[in-house]
Amino acid sequence: MTSGQPLPDRIERLTLLAQSLITNPSWEDLTRLLALRIFDSWACDQVVIYAVQSRGSLVHRASFGIDDPPAVAEISLQQHPELASVLSYGRTTWVVDPSGTDRLLPAALGRRDGGGIVIAPLNRVNIPEFVLIATFSEPPPENPASGPFMSSVVSLLELRLAMSQAPTTRRVASDASGMAVEFSDRQQRILERIQDGKTNKSIARELGFSESTIRQETLRLYRSLGVNSRTDAVVAARAKGLLQDASAS
């Protein structure tokens, strides 16, 4: 494909993506939408969202079209220096000819037979927190609107990132003394996983945040609950009705 779809069709696709954000879709739903409705005319094969970890790796958050998910569960940037270099630019990168780029991505990602790859950091306050990787079975269309179209898609995904991390919905409970305790959805999810005995590292992997973010939120939970340990946090949260004792069900 050399001409690409006409501009009105691109506007319709961007409108569809923007409208989907209203329902606060999961990253899994978004990868499916991107592959099947937004990038479908570009012969999209795979769409993967990775969370950027402080230890120098990318951890799988959501994907569509991956045949071997365990093979792409984590990408070490030390083992893929070319990818680290691309991400250091902080902007969307198009790889028109991915042949000979084995050091760029794991073998389970991307095509090596003339397709194309798009790698786009998803930034929050100019810091990449997620990375979008999309692979195509055909070269990207040579159309002046292709670049702005992809930039608009990335901007909308960054809006989704901001929405998912904004503590807009909060849960409030009070204990017998009438003291109110208020938690964001993110803190509630962390608290539930603390009850399950999971470490900050495993919670970070599961929720797609950095381990530092989980640590900071855990400390905020301690302050709100007036405790100093994970065990005491669970006990206090159960007493305030913020957690249900799983062993009692």
Image (cartoon, helix red, strand yellow):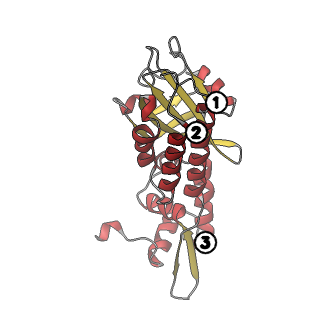
- Between circles 3 and 1, the one closer to the viewer is 1
Q: What separation in Å lies between label 2 and label 3 (alpha carbons)? A: 28 Å
**Residue 105, position in %: x, y?**
51, 23
Q: Amino acid at mark 1?
A: Leu
- Residue at 42% across / 22% down in the picture? 137
**Residue 127, position in %: x, y?**
68, 42
The disc at residue 15 is none
Which badge, 3 or 1, comes first in the chain's sequence?
1
Q: What separation in Å lies between label 2 and label 1 (alpha carbons)? A: 10 Å
| Horizontal side, residue 65 vs residue 194: left or right | left
**Residue 23, position in %: x, y?**
46, 60
The disc at residue 224 is 3
Task: Give the residue at mark 2.
Answer: 52
Q: Is residue 78 visible?
A: no
Q: How many numbered badges does the structure rendering display?
A: 3
Q: Amino acid at mark 3?
A: Ser
Q: Compared to 105, does 223 lie above or below?
A: below
Other residues around mark 1 within 10 Å, as few (<14) / some (14–19) / many (≥20): some
- Residue at 61% across / 42% down in the picture? 152
Q: Residue furthest left?
A: 249
| Secondary structure at numbered mark 1 | helix
Task: Give the residue at mark 1.
Answer: 87
Q: Is residue 135 visible?
A: yes
Q: Compared to 87, does 244 lie above or below?
A: below
Which badge, 2 or 1, comes first in the chain's sequence?
2
- Between circles 2 and 3, the one closer to the viewer is 2
Q: Using the rendered view, name the quadrant where residue 150 is placed.
A: top right
| Secondary structure at numbered mark 2 | strand
